[in-house]
Amino acid sequence: MTLHPEERLLALLRDTADPWEVAGRARVPFPVLVGMLRDLEERGLVRSRPGRLTLTPAGRKHAPRTVALDSRALAALKRRYLRLVAQRPHATDAYDQGHLTVDSLMGRLREMARFGDLVEGARFAIMGDDDLLSIALALTGAPAQIAVFEIDERLTAFIADLAERHSLPIEVHTHDLRKALPARHRGAYDVFVCDPSETRAGLRMFVGRGLSALAPGPGSVGYFGVTLVESDYEKWRELQAWLTAQPVVLSAVIPEQGFYDNWPTQLEEARAYGHPAFTRAARAPWYRSALWRLETLAGFEPRNPRPLPGDPIADEHYFAIASKERR
Amino acid sequence: MTLHPEERLLALLRDTADPWEVAGRARVPFPVLVGMLRDLEERGLVRSRPGRLTLTPAGRKHAPRTVALDSRALAALKRRYLRLVAQRPHATDAYDQGHLTVDSLMGRLREMARFGDLVEGARFAIMGDDDLLSIALALTGAPAQIAVFEIDERLTAFIADLAERHSLPIEVHTHDLRKALPARHRGAYDVFVCDPSETRAGLRMFVGRGLSALAPGPGSVGYFGVTLVESDYEKWRELQAWLTAQPVVLSAVIPEQGFYDNWPTQLEEARAYGHPAFTRAARAPWYRSALWRLETLAGFEPRNPRPLPGDPIADEHYFAIASKERR
């Protein structure tokens, strides 16, 4: 399974026969699209008539199926997810945790579905999974394989247990992402997802490990959340410059896509700043991140990132990390 | 009027007294926010109590007002806009035109409002205005000044006439963007907006001219649409690498934000490719762009961009441009 333009185009043709809609959604320039269509017609996979594009029976066999998530499907998914993860371990600041609200997690799946990334048979690598995204992803039925790399044994045990009891295609690796992925995972995935620690070293480490897991060549995908509560726009710019110096494009930066549940130590962390306004607990989720989506381009090669100096997962909580970096 | 973090924070405090909501929406790291709040308190502009942040009377005087656009306000704006632009000139392929649907234009204003960029007193520069965004922006009541730089005299005459009859704060300059902006416009604006031609030279020219209009230092903003119908992701990557090599960050890349009205010559242009499916007129808008938002950072200086070789506004229609670039 790959996510290259041709497979994406075939998948799109399961969805619509309207050539103009295909041209709008194919995410390749019009002349390239016409060339791809001609090629698929010659290979007997696509048939075209005036105002109409359809898959042939052979085309239907080749075309990847993608999962579409309308609000109804998402609501059902949310109920199943909540039932499964009811006994999840609490977030711990030992690993800079804090997880997405369930609605934001569902919103993230909806974005993946909109991009056509929930392709049946796709291989997902998740770098750190305190969101338990692996469970939600598995419930969509799309992924052939979901590999979780997570340092917290409470989480890896919890996910492994759920995966076994419910026959979910998840494999769990208790792994410290400060270390490179084992060689057999390098370049072995179509999509990575992570929610990085936001020290400079942490961002490079999480996103870099994610990139090291992606298949070489164009069309692989990465999703991750970046905040402006811990990072600033200068740090965003550095990350963007680092990424786009590689054969990697930012295909989306969606502001405020993810909101996070308030975590138990939050008030204590804020109080450390001694500001009088921040002395009462938050009534609603306020900590939020933008969802970034990257796509690899021709020439992409999975490499292990060079580590940056500093401890990417500091022992201190994030408020302290942020204040330390400022000085 | 500037759009620096401090003004944005004061504007935000008009909207909410909840410190956590402020922390989530301020778009600066938490420790920076606390420092800014302390400073504003010392200057008598902000008062803080447990769980509450408010503007003092002096603070209310200093705090910029921003326009909020809920669906009701947007619907009213849309009616007024449609009434005013009913007699607009038709799109012409002489200048690679084609304009946003009115709903997408309203959606673009909503994004600007969400970002807090519809600040009363702000100065907007619009590089090419076949969308007649200048009219819609003026109707929000926010901008103190809107400068339109547009090559098509049919449009500049139409906009100037509307501006005069309805006392809108729009000044219109018939200007070929292949030439630098007149010196007095360099660095004179808070926000630029454009919908670039998507040849490589065109992207650099439109976005580069936009940057040359922005005030030096951090906090100025640019909005522009980029498609995947004419551009490909490699071109996106090049533009992203070029931008983030400067003190400029991509604060948003919102896929499929803008849909464009079908234009009269579309079918003829598509037919030039000789593909049988594209021989009937599109029934609905299909041509779409992602909305990019950039923000300038510390050290930003408005400069005139070095022109790239090639004619950024080719005489041919965009399908032909796209096919020419591919070869």
Image (tube, coloured by chain):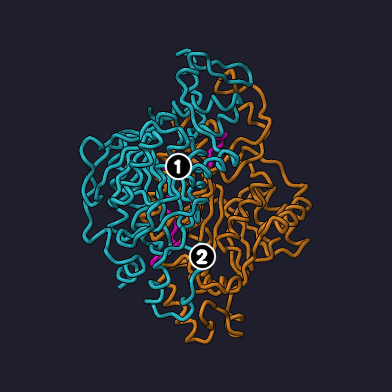
Chain colours: A orange, B cyan
Give the number of callouts.
Answer: 2
- Is A305 magenta? The answer is yes
Tell me which residue sits at (22%, 35%) in the image: B184
User: Callout 2, which amino acid?
Assistant: Arg
Q: Nearer the viewer, residue B71 or A327?
A: B71
Q: Label 1 marks which chain's residue?
A: B
Please rate how many residues cluster around mark 1, counting C-alpha atoms within 10 Å: few if below 14, some from 14 to 19, many from 20.
many
Tell me which residue sits at (53%, 30%) in the image: A320
- Is A141 magenta? The answer is no
Q: Is residue A4 visible?
A: no
User: Callout 1, which amino acid?
Assistant: Ala
Left or right of B302 on screen, residue B244: right
Span of residues in magenta: A296-318
Q: Which of B39 and A326 is in front in this view?
A: B39
The picture quadrant where one finds residue A18 is bottom right
Q: What residue is shown with label 1?
A: B136
The picture quadrant where one finds residue B62 is top left
Tell me which residue sits at (52%, 87%) in the image: A44
State the predominant SS element of the stretch in magenta.
Answer: loop
Secondary-structure class at tag 1 = helix
Q: Which quarter shows the N terminus of chain A?
A: bottom right
Q: Label 2 marks which chain's residue?
A: A
> How far from the left and from the top, in percent, is residue A156?
67, 53
> How far from the left and from the top, in percent, is residue A226?
51, 44
> How far from the left and from the top, in percent, is residue A196?
53, 46
Q: What residue is shown with label 2?
A: A25
Secondary-structure class at tag 2 = helix
